Amino acid sequence: MKIYDLLIIGAGPAGLIAGARASELGASVLILEKNKQAGTKLLMTGGGRCNLTNLDFSSIRDLAFRYQTATNFLLSPLTRFGPKELCNFFEEAGLKLKEEAKGRVFPESNKARSVLDLLLKKIKNNSGEILLETEVKKIVISSDNSEKIEKVELEDGRLFKAKNFLIATGGKSYPLSGSSGDAYPWLKKLGHTIIEPKPGLAPIKISENFIKDLEGLSFSNLKISLKNNKENNKDGKEVKTYSELGDIIFGADNISGPAVLNLSRLIDLKNLKNILIEIDFFPDLNLEELNKKLQNIFHSANKNLRNALTEILPPRFVEVFLSNLKINPDQKANSVSREEKELISRNLKYFKLKVSGLYGFDKAMITRGGLSLKEVSSKNFKSKLFDNLYLAGEVLDIDGPTGGYNLQVSWTSGYLVADDLFLK
Ligand SMILES: Cc1cc2nc3c(=O)[nH]c(=O)nc-3n(C[C@H](O)[C@H](O)[C@H](O)COP(=O)(O)OP(=O)(O)OC[C@H]3O[C@@H](n4cnc5c(N)ncnc54)[C@H](O)[C@@H]3O)c2cc1C
């Protein structure tokens, strides 16, 4: 039986970059992937365009800070193979990249496929092997050395041996893409600690029924804030407000979009009763300036209120918005009362929605939790319990905001595993 230098479980971004780098450094590499194709989730990233990293940071500390509890762990890895090194890696291999708003980096082709193809080509050209439709079921410890992994076993009993093993099976979100949390029980059995996996970057569920009438609408450049509703807050304490500028997409019972997904990271599901989302539809104007803008609309004598407001807002939104405020949309725009005008402008600046929960793993972009970072070396992503076991990507207890940060962790960890093992 062939004994590979590195056996990788999972052909996602972490496993593929590890395989590409290790084979480039002359190692014999085998990647086992349970799907029919490699990189299923990678192809879905960035709406099919793959937001592969983010260059909007002032220092590595500033960048690492965005990963909350993993900040200190990531300082050294991101210094050695961070966004800039990643961009060089891809560009030197012939993939043109471009930077868009907020530092987000995409392939110039706008196709995640070109990122995947480049990695597969590198692996193939360096004689790396990928076996598809090959699901690992078990990891077997060496009978001679309890600190070493000896082999992996498939459902049908086939065995594969290697000198080193990398688990890059991802988290639990979007399970249909192949990432279904397979490694958690293996790791627990090996004596590792798993921080409870939870859905991360998930659409936020909204209580109000009228939300269903907004389904499909999307807005750009709004200010979206997560707030604690003080009226319901018994001790009336001042609480923090977190805000993001960005787009919002309305679903049948939820809101999503990058800004909303980032705010979802801060929602404590145990304390939902007090949590509100507040939307400012005109963040560039203060209330007085908005009132002035609205005056022009309220002056149109020959239009009803509904038609007048559709000059600045989508018709379907106007319908729901006015009905919710119990304001007659058919009245002439110039006959709207002072109280009604005030109600309209305040609600366009401070539009409140009650949060009822978060979507689960089926719709969450990433998994929070995973293998405890206390049990992995930040030098090389090696398990602290086994001499030849490495972990990379979303299987680790690391999560970042939207904008390319989650893929960056997979690239960094996968690449550094290969360098640690094979860079002379
Ligand atoms: C819709 C969507 C859009 C996203 N967009 C972005 C984005 O634009 N930018 C960004 O930074 N992040 C994005 N993410 C997050 C990003 O895709 C993940 O963080 C990243 O894919 C994790 O990489 P990974 O290699 O660790 O795991 P995965 O990509 O999950 O890959 C793991 C692989 O392991 C395989 N596997 C699992 N178990 C086994 C087994 N038992 N045997 C064999 N193979 C197995 C799986 O089939 C899978 O192919 C997005 C996520 C989603 C769902």
Image (tube, grey):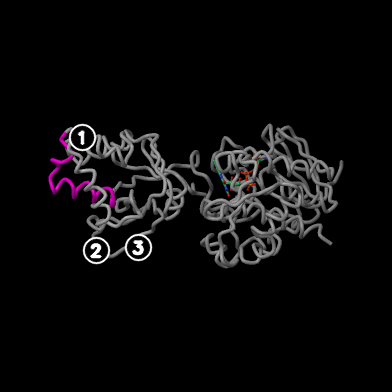
In the rendered structure, find residue 240 and report the number of the disc placed on it. Answer: 3
Residue 185 shows in the view? no
Circle 1 is placed at which residue position?
Answer: 303
Three-letter amino acid code at disc 3? Lys
Name the amino acid, label 2.
Asp
Say which quarter of the image contains residue 300. Answer: top left
Kindly indicate the quadrant of the structure image that contains residue 333.
Answer: top left
User: Looking at numbered disc 1 in the image, what kind of residue is underneath it?
Assistant: Lys
User: Where residue 226 is drawn, which disc sits there?
Assistant: none
| Quadrant in which the C terminus appears | bottom right
Q: Nearer the viewer, residue 122 or 34?
A: 122
Magenta: main secondary structure equals helix
Q: Where, quadrant-wise, is the N terminus in this rendering?
A: top right
Mark 3, mark 1: which one is toward the viewer? 1
Q: CA distance from mark 3 to mark 1?
A: 42 Å
- Tell me where the magenta segment starts and ends, as one range: 331-350
* Element at label 1: loop
The tally of labels here is 3
Which of the marked residues, 2 or 3, is nearer the chain's N terminus? 2
Would residue 198 appear left or right of 421 to someone viewing this image?
Answer: left
Is the residue under label 1 in contact with that under label 3 (CB below 8 Å)? no
| 423 w.r.t. 219: above or below | below
Q: Residue at x 81, y 60 (%)?
A: 423
Mark 3 closeness class: few <14, some 14–19, many ≥20 residues within 10 Å: few
Q: Which residue is mark 2?
A: 235
- Asked if residue 2 lies in the magenta stretch, the reply is no
- Element assignment for label 2: loop
Camera-side residue of 364 and 391: 364
Mark 2 in CB contact with mark 3 (< 8 angstroms): no
- Vertical side of 333 occupied by 168: above or below: below
Which quarter of the rendered image does ligand 1 occupy? top right
